[in-house]
Each structure stands twice: as C-alpha cells, then as structure tokens.
Image: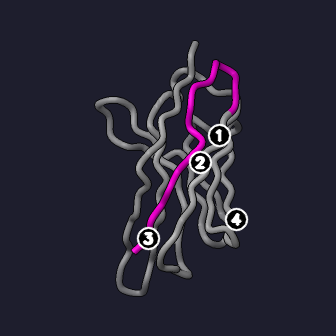
Amino acid sequence: QVQLVESGGGFVQTGGSLTLSCVKSGNRFSSNTFGWYRQFPEKQRELVATMSSSGIANYADAVKGRFTISRDNAKNTVYLQMNSLKPEDTAVYYCNYRARTIQTERDYWGQGTQVTVSS
C-alpha cells in the first residue's frame, strides 16, 4: 500500500504563489510517476502536471510556464510550485502516485488540498 499526504494549500490573491507538497509512505515501486491533479466543483478531475521516476515532466497547457513540478526521491516527496496564480486555478488539488509492475498499474491518491485564488 501507498499513502500520500498533501500540504500547502490555502488562500492567495491573483498573481500570488503557493507551493504544494505531497509526502509518500508505504511500498516502493521502481517504475512510478508522481502527479498533481485538480478538480473544480461538479467537474472531473484533470491533470495539472506529472513527473516520472526518470525526471520527465509533463504539464497541462493551462499551467505551462506558471507551475513547476519537482520531486525529491530521497524524501519521497513531490512538490508543485504555483506562480502567477489566477482565479481559474481555484480548485481542490490532489497528489497522485502511479505505481507500475510488470503486470499491473495502480493509482494512489491523497486526500486533496484546497487552493483558492481571489480576484
């Protein structure tokens, strides 16, 4: 099993910055991807950014140039640095860990952290 605990959400004004953190505990998988997703009210969860175990990052178009994902494997932690925040970034942000074995692929999720950007 894998457990994910997020922190760092909060309230910020337009143009401000926040950094989200997610600490992973539990089983290790050599092939894995950390990710951040967000969910707007009454909408499906959508991808924000991912980073593979080899360090390859992927971003949603809406956040490119403003958000940066990084990971510290020694600390089992993934970060999301969010700059130039906009009201449309207001959402619940979820940490994701995708674990792969030869036979399976499984997603684990954190509990979510609210980010609110005021106009």
User: Whole-percent x and y of residue 52?
Assistant: 59, 66
Report the Cα–Cα distance between label 3 and label 4: 17 Å
Pick the front one: 25 or 98? 25
Residue at horizontal 44 percent and vertical 45 percent from the top: 112
User: Whole-percent x and y of residue 79?
Assistant: 64, 52
Could you say whether the residue bearing mark 1 is in a helix, strand or loop? Answer: loop
Image position of 80 with respect to 115: above or below = below
Pick the front one: 19 or 103? 19
Q: Which residue is mark 3?
A: 2
Q: Tag 4 or tag 3, which sits nearer the N-term?
A: 3
Q: Tag 3 or tag 2, which sits nearer the N-term?
A: 3
Q: Which residue is mark 2?
A: 59
Could you say whether the residue bearing mark 3 is in a helix, strand or loop? Answer: strand
Q: Tag 1 or tag 2, which sits nearer the N-term?
A: 2
The crowding category of the residue bearing disc 2, from other C-alpha atoms within 10 Å (few below 14, some 14 to 19, many at least 20), is some
The crowding category of the residue bearing disc 3, from other C-alpha atoms within 10 Å (few below 14, some 14 to 19, many at least 20), is some
Residue at horizontal 68 percent and vertical 43 percent from the top: 81
